[in-house]
Amino acid sequence: MKPRFDLLPPLAMAVAAVGVALAFIAPPDRVQGNLQKLMYVHVPAAWIAYLAFVLTLIGSIGWLWRREPRWDRLAAAAAEVGVFFTGLAIALGAIWGKPVWGVWWTWDARLVTTALLFFVYLGYLALRRVTEDRSDRARRSAVFGVVAFIQVPVVHFSVIWWRTLHQPPTVLRPGDPTIDHTMLAVLLVNLVGFTLLGAWMLRQRFRLLAQLEDLEDALAARDLELAGHSIETPKLEGRRSDV
């Protein structure tokens, strides 16, 4: 299994590089021109954020069910990846929105709900940092991770439930996608590339969290050992009783 995982970084970089190259040669949008090509990173970033938060939900439910550390590590690692890609999607959306809408930010339903999603999961990560006991941290984070996921479908369906400036779904919709099929093919390549990059980042964070837990255990064991030595009865050398 390990050699397969070792292929993940170069494969992810190769597919992502091909996707970016195709984005440069893809046809420009009839209305927005080449500015539309931000879509090839903006949409995959949002997709990876969704997928990461689904994994946080799965990891949270898994910990509540099995109480195994690996589920907590999965939830935490996925939340970190999700927050990163949510922030990337918001930043790219602002760059895209400035020339199209005339402003960097507007109180649009999709933008507002995405910002709330970002801050909700930042709160999740903050909760993990301020809770020292590992069991308490896992339990509280698991409950938070389940409740926080409610925000994900709210973000996705916001363009359907409310009137927004943001365009409605063009790919994840019933029937034939409304996007040009050449653009769709390039977008799908980028989706695969970014998914592989997200999986690589998730694996690295998962492994790092496991190593941090091992380090915490080693430090705790050392502290216990030192504390035990400090209360040993002193041994007096070179003295005999006169009795």
Image: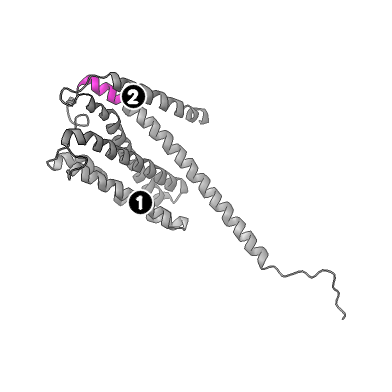
- Residue 142 position within the rendered picture, expressed as x and y whole percent measured from the top left: 37, 52
Above or below, 218 against 228 in this view is above
Judge depth for marks 2 and 1 and give the one in front: 2
Q: Which residues are magenta?
A: 180-189
**Apparent side of residue 76 relative to residue 117 in the rendered image (left or right):** right
| Place of residue 125 in the rendered image (x, y in percent of width and height, measured from the top left) | 38, 50
Q: Which residue is mark 2?
A: 20
| Magenta stretch, main secondary structure class | helix
Vertical placement of residue 21 versus 153, above or below? above
Q: Report if residue 120 lies within the magenta region.
A: no
Question: Under tag 2, what secondary structure?
Answer: helix
Q: Amino acid at mark 1?
A: Tyr
Query: What's the colour scheme?
Result: one colour
Q: Which residue is mark 1?
A: 124
Residue type pointed to by label 2: Val
| 229 sits to left or right of 19 | right
Residue 206: percent from left, percent from top: 46, 41
Q: Residue at x 29, y 25 (%)?
A: 188
